[in-house]
C-alpha cells in the first residue's frame, strides 16, 4: 500500500506539496466541525459582531433541498474557511478562500459565487481524478489482502470447529498416520475429510495443501491443532478463574488417583456460585506426583492458587473423602488449610460417607458377609464361561433382566443392581444352575461349583437376605445418587440422612414381613437340627447359663438386628458432621417462623463467626428480609431458591449481607463427586494409546472435555484473532 505523510488538519498550515495533495485526494480533508461555536471566527463590524455559521457549510437549492459543501474547511488558527481543492490544485487563481482564508461573514454569498466559478470546478475535478488514479493501485492491493485474509479465515473456521467438537467430547485426535487419505490418520483428519465431502472449499484446500509437507503453510497440521487446543483451554480456564474471583467465596474439592502411566494425578475442583445464584463445581487442573502427605498437597495447592491469583482467605469450605491424610483433624489436609484460613470448614463427602455406612453394615455379621460374597461368586461363575452365560441367557429369554450383576468396590449402586437382579430372577437363576448340574458333559469342577451355589440358594437365610438387602440398597442407592448432584447442599444432606435414619428404625418391626416374602420365594423352612460347637466355659460359668437360639431367632437377633443397629449407629455418627455446619445457617430457612428475638440472636451468632464478611447491620437486614418474604406469594424453601430469588428480583443490592450468607452456604460442598467424575475423563483421555501425553496437553484436553459447557460457547472469531496475533508474520488474517 502507498504510505502518505499525514498533513495538518488546519488548511492554513498545509504544506502545499505533492504529498499533501496525494493524501487529501485519497482520504479527503476534515472539515473541522467538532466545535460548532467557532469562537475564533468572531469578527467585529460597525453595526455588530458576527461569527461563522454552520449554515455556510450547506447549500440551499432552488427546490428547497440542501447539499453539503464538502470542499469548505474551517481553520482554527485563523478563524476563517478555505476551499480545500482550490488551495491545493488552483495554481494561478487567487482569492480569500484560497490564500488567507474567507471571513467576511457579512457577505456569505461570495462562497456561492466561488463554487460556480470555472477555476473551482476545475480544481475539484483535478482532485477527484488524482484520487481515482491513486486509488486504483491502493484498491487492488487492498482487494488482494482482503481476499487472502478471507481465504485463510475460512480455513481456520473449519479447523477450529473440528478441534472444538472433538476436544469437548474427549475424543483422541491423532492416529498412526498423519496423511490425508490414509484410513489410519485419526479423528482430526477424518473429520476434516468428512466435512470436505460436502464442502468444496475445504476439499479444494486439502487437495492443494493436504500433504505438502514442511515449509508450506496449510494450517491443517497437528501442530496447528494443538495450538488451538491450548488456546481454547486457556480461554476456558481464564473464564473459570474470572467467575471464581467474581463470586469471591468458594470451596475446595480435592482427590487423587493414578493414571495409566502410574503417575498420581491430584484433581482440583472449585465450587462457587454464578451470577444467577446457582452453585457450580468447575475443574481447574490435574497436578502430577504431589505425594499423599498433607504437607505436599497443601504446597501444590498454594502454588496453583498463586499461579491463578486465587486468594486462599476467600475459601469457605473443603470437601474430601474420609482418608486420614485428607480428613485428619491434626495433620490432615483440612487441618493444614485451616491453619491458613480458619473459616474453611471441612465437610466430609456425603456420598462416600453413605457408602461407608453400607459397607460397615454389610460386614458386621456372618450372614451379611456371606451374602455379598455369594453375589460376587454367582456373577463370577456365569461370566467365566461364554457357554454358561449362554445357558443363563436362554433361561432369561422370557425376562427383561437378562444377566446377573457384579459387585464394585467403589460404586455402591453396583451392589443395589446385583441384589435387585438376583431378587427379580431368583427362580431363573436356580433353573440355570440346575440345568448345569444335570448336564452330563459338564466338568465335575463346574458341577461342584453349581452345586455349592444351589445349596446356598436353598437356605431361607439367603432368601431373607436377598429380600432385606434389596429393600435397603434400593433406598440407599437412590439417596446416594441424589447426594452426588452439584445442587445438593448441607441442609438437604441432613434431611436425607435423617430420612434414612428414620427408615432404618422403622425396619426393626418389619422382620415378619421380610420373612414372609422370603418363604414365598423359596418355599423353605428353617433348619431344626443345628450342630453347635461346644464352647469352653469360663471359670465363673455354669452349663445352664448359655442361651441357644433356634434358626429363626438366630437370624433375627444375630443378623437382622445387628445389621440394623450398625446402620443406625453409623448414620447417627456420620450425620453429626453435617448437622454441626447446618446449625450455623439453619435460621436461613426459618425467616418466617422464628420470632424477631430468635432471628436476631441467630443472625448475631453467625455474624460473630464471619465478622470480616458480615456487617453490624446484618441482623437488621434479616428483619427486613423476613418482612419481604411475608409479602410475597411463594416463599423459597431452600437456600438455593432464596439465592436465585435475590438475583431474579434484582434485590441483592438491597440485602447485600443476605446475598453474602447465601453464597457462603451454597459454596460449601457436600460431596467430592466432581473430582471422582474428573477421573473418568482422565481414564478416557490418557489411555494406553496416549500414555506418554504431557501434563500440559493432558490438562488442556481435560478442561475442554470436563467443562464442555463452557467450551461450546467459545467464539470462533476470538480464537482465530488470538491465533492471528501469534502468526502475523506468516499469514494475514
Image (cartoon, rainbow, N blue to C red):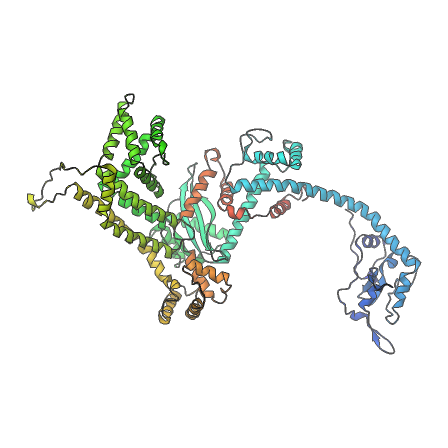
Q: Residue at x 86, y 78 (%)?
A: 47
**Residue depicted at x 27% and y 44%:** 468
Q: Horizontal placement of 200 versus 709: left or right?
A: right
- Image-quadrant location for residue 187: top right
Q: Position of residue 664 (x, y in %)?
A: 43, 59
Residue at 64 percent across and 45 percent down: it is: 724
Above or below for 60 versus 692: below
Image side of residue 323 versus residue 8, left or right:
left
Q: Which of these two is toward me, 512 or 731?
A: 512
| Residue appearing at x 85%, y 50% in the figure | 130
- Return the residue found at the far top: 441
Q: Nearer the viewer, residue 213 or 638?
A: 638
Q: Quadrant of the C terminus?
A: top right
Q: Is residue 75 left or right of residue 256?
A: right
* Residue 693 shows in this picture: yes
Q: Is residue 358 above or below residue 493?
A: above
Task: Depth check: give the residue in front, 136 or 632.
Answer: 632
- Percent position (x, y) of residue 514? 24, 44
The image position of residue 602, as x and y in percent, is: 36, 67
Number of marks in the rendered image: 0
446 is higher (above) or lower (below) than 131: above
Can residue 377 be seen from the camera position used here? no
| Quadrant in the picture for residue 379 | top left
Which residue appears farthest toward the bottom when viewing the image?
Answer: 47
Q: Position of residue 472 (x, y in %)?
A: 30, 46
Amino acid at each position: 500500500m502507498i504510505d502518505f505523510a499525514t498533513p495538518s488538519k488546519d488548511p492554513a498550515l498545509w504544506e502545499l506539496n505533492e504529498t499533501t495533495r496525494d493524501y487529501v485526494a485519497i482520504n479527503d480533508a476534515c472539515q473541522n466541525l467538532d466545535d460548532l461555536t467557532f469562537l475564533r471566527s468572531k469578527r467585529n463590524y460597525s453595526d455588530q459582531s458576527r461569527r461563522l455559521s454552520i449554515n455556510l457549510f450547506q447549500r440551499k437549492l432552488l427546490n428547497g433541498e440542501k447539499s453539503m459543501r464538502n470542499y469548505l474547511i474551517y481553520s482554527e488558527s485563523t478563524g476563517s474557511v478555505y476551499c480545500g481543492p482550490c488551495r491545493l490544485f488552483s495554481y494561478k487563481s487567487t482569492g480569500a478562500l484560497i490564500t488567507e482564508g474567507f471571513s467576511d461573514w457579512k457577505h456569505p454569498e461570495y462562497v456561492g459565487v466561488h463554487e460556480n466559478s470555472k477555476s473551482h470546478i476545475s480544481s475539484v475535478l483535478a482532485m477527484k481524478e488524482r484520487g481515482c488514479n491513486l486509488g486504483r493501485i491502493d484498491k487492488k492491493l487492498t482487494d488482494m489482502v482482503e481476499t487472502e485474509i478471507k481465504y485463510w479465515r475460512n480455513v481456520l473456521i473449519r479447523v477450529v470447529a473440528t478441534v472444538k467438537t472433538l476436544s469437548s467430547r474427549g475424543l483422541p485426535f491423532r492416529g498412526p498416520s498423519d496423511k490425508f487419505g490414509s484410513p489410519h490418520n485419526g479423528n482430526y483428519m477424518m473429520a476434516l475429510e468428512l466435512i470436505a465431502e460436502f464442502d468444496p472449499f475445504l476439499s479444494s484446500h486439502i487437495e492443494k495443501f493436504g500433504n505438502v509437507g514442511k515449509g508450506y503453510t496449510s494450517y491443517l497440521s497437528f501442530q496447528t491443532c494443538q495450538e488451538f487446543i491450548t488456546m481454547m483451554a486457556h480461554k476456558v480456564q481464564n473464564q473459570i478463574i474470572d467467575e471464581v474471583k467474581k463470586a469471591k467465596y468458594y470451596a475446595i474439592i480435592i482427590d487423587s488417583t493414578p493414571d495409566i502411566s502410574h503417575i498420581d494425578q491430584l484433581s482440583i475442583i472449585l465450587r462457587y456460585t454464578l451470577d444467577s445464584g446457582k452453585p457450580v463445581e468447575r475443574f481447574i487442573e490435574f497436578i502430577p506426583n504431589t505425594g499423599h502427605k498433607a504437607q505436599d498437597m497443601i504446597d501444590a495447592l498454594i502454588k496453583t492458587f498463586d499461579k491463578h491469583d486465587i486468594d486462599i482467605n476467600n475459601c469457605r469450605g473443603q470437601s474430601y473423602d474420609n482418608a486420614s491424610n485428607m480428613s485428619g483433624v491434626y495433620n490432615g489436609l483440612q487441618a493444614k488449610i485451616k491453619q491458613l484460613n480458619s473459616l474453611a470448614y471441612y465437610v466430609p463427602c456425603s456420598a462416600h460417607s453413605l457408602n461407608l455406612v453400607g459397607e460397615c453394615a454389610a460386614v458386621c455379621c456372618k450372614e451379611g458377609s456371606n451374602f455379598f460374597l455369594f453375589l460376587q461368586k454367582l456373577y463370577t461363575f456365569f461370566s467365566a464361561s461364554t457357554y454358561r452365560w449362554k445357558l443363563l441367557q436362554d433361561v432369561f429369554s422370557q425376562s427383561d433382566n437378562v444377566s446377573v450383576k457384579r459387585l464394585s468396590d467403589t460404586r455402591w449402586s453396583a451392589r443395589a443392581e446385583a441384589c435387585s437382579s438376583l431378587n427379580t430372577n431368583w427362580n431363573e437363576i436356580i433353573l440355570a444352575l440346575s440345568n448345569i448340574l444335570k448336564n452330563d458333559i459338564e466338568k465335575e469342577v463346574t458341577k461342584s461349583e453349581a452345586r455349592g451355589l444351589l445349596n446356598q440358594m436353598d437356605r431361607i437365610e439367603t432368601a431373607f437376605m436377598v429380600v432385606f438387602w434389596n429393600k435397603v440398597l434400593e433406598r440407599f442407592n437412590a439417596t446416594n445418587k441424589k447426594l452426588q448432584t452439584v445442587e445438593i447442599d448441607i441442609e438437604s444432606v441432613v434431611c436425607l440422612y435423617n430420612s434414612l435414619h428414620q427408615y432404618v428404625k422403622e425396619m426393626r418391626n418389619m422382620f415378619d414381613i421380610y420373612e414372609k416374602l422370603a418363604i414365598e420365594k423359596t418355599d423353605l423352612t428353617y433348619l431344626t437340627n443345628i450342630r453347635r460347637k461346644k464352647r469352653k466355659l469360663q471359670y465363673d460359668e455354669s452349663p445352664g447359663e448359655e442361651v441357644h437360639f433356634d434358626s429363626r431367632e438366630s437370624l433375627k437377633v444375630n443378623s437382622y438386628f445387628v445389621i440394623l443397629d450398625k446402620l443406625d449407629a453409623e448414620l447417627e455418627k456420620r450425620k453429626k458432621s453435617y448437622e454441626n455446619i447446618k446449625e450455623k445457617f439453619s435460621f436461613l430457612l426459618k425467616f418466617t417462623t422464628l420470632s424477631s428475638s430468635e432471628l436476631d440472636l441467630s443472625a448475631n451468632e453467625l455474624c460473630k463467626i464471619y465478622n470480616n464478611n458480615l456487617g453490624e447491620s446484618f441482623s437488621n437486614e434479616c428483619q427486613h428480609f423476613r418482612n419481604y418474604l411475608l409479602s410475597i406469594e411463594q416463599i423459597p424453601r431452600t437456600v438455593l431458591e432464596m439465592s436465585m430469588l435475590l438475583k431474579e428480583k434484582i434485590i441483592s443490592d438491597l440485602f447485600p449481607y443476605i446475598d453474602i450468607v447465601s453464597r457462603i452456604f451454597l459454596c460449601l460442598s457436600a460431596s467430592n463427586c466432581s473430582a471422582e467424575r474428573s477421573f473418568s475423563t482422565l481414564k478416557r483421555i490418557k489411555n494406553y494409546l496416549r500414555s506418554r501425553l504431557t501434563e500440559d496437553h493432558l490438562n488442556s484436553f481435560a478442561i475442554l472435555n470436563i467443562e464442555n459447557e463452557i467450551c461450546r460457547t467459545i467464539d470462533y472469531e476470538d480464537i482465530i484473532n488470538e491465533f492471528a496475533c501469534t502468526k502475523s508474520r506468516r499469514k494475514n488474517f
